[in-house]
Amino acid sequence: MQITSQTIKNLIVTVNILICTSALADPVINQSRLDRYREEYKDAVTPIKYILTHEDESPCCSDTSGKKVYILNIRQNAPGKLAYSSEINKLFKEHFEVEIDSESLISTPNADYIVLTMSRPAEYSDRKVRCAAGMGESRAFLVSVSGNKVDIINRDLSDCNHKYRVLRTPTATGYKVSSINGAGKPVSFLLHGTSFIRSNDPVSKEEK
């Protein structure tokens, strides 16, 4: 069989396409790694479903590593999908310490909803309204996770002057945000279908 220069060129193009396709493919986690994570968190007081991780399993998460940070559902079956958000990754470069509040999890057939809490020292804060003197900056994002997709639903769920809690009643599912010092009315973000609706009215007497 005679191999022509055109055949070689075609092979080179094919190999390059395969390499590019592999590089662009979404990263996944194998079953043994998922099993290790489940074993690591099996004794947690609050059941753990989501963690922050790097693709290569290196210690997470430092703004100095330069590696992408993913949200991983450790309860899924392999191949485990890694959910990525460039905006969340940017927080680490801005000196935020980011954590997943496992108690905030709300699961639905379409997506899971979790709260990411974040804080950073006052010297890095660019907000005009600061926390009390000597305190750093704190925020909370409400995000949805579905497969490898992350959507940020609310970027100001709470701050150093407000707190949130999860609502799980027969008539209301969502989050309630209230002032730490009790000033003003609480605000509720209630889940209706795949959207959160803001309400300024108390949900029920038992939730006050």
Image: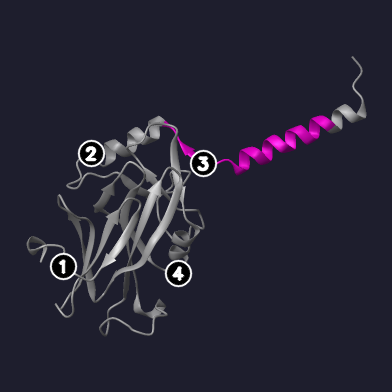
| Picture layout, residue 99 above or below residue 44 | below
| Residue 87 image point, x, y percent | 47, 62
What residue do we see at 16% from left, 63% from top?
Answer: 203
| Residue 105 image point, x, y percent | 26, 50
Instruction: Identify which amino acid the numbered label 1 is placed on.
Output: Pro
Residue wearing tag 3: 27
Of circles 1 and 3, the one toward us is: 1
Helix, strand or loop status at disc 3: loop
Residue 6 in view, yes or no:
yes
Residue 94: numbered disc: 4
Left or right for 141, reference 70:
left
In three-dimensional space, the C-alpha distance between marks 3 and 2, rounded to whole angstroms, equals 25 Å
Q: Let me know if residue 90 is in the magenta part.
A: no
Residues at marks 3 and 2 touching, judged by CB atoms closer than 8 Å? no
Residue 42: numbered disc: 2
| Picture layout, residue 177 above or below residue 73 | below
What residue do we see at 44% from left, 47% from top?
Answer: 58
Q: Residues within 10 Å of mark 4 (few under 14, many from 20)?
A: few
In three-dimensional space, the C-alpha distance between marks 3 and 4, rounded to whole angstroms, equals 25 Å
Helix, strand or loop status at disc 1: loop
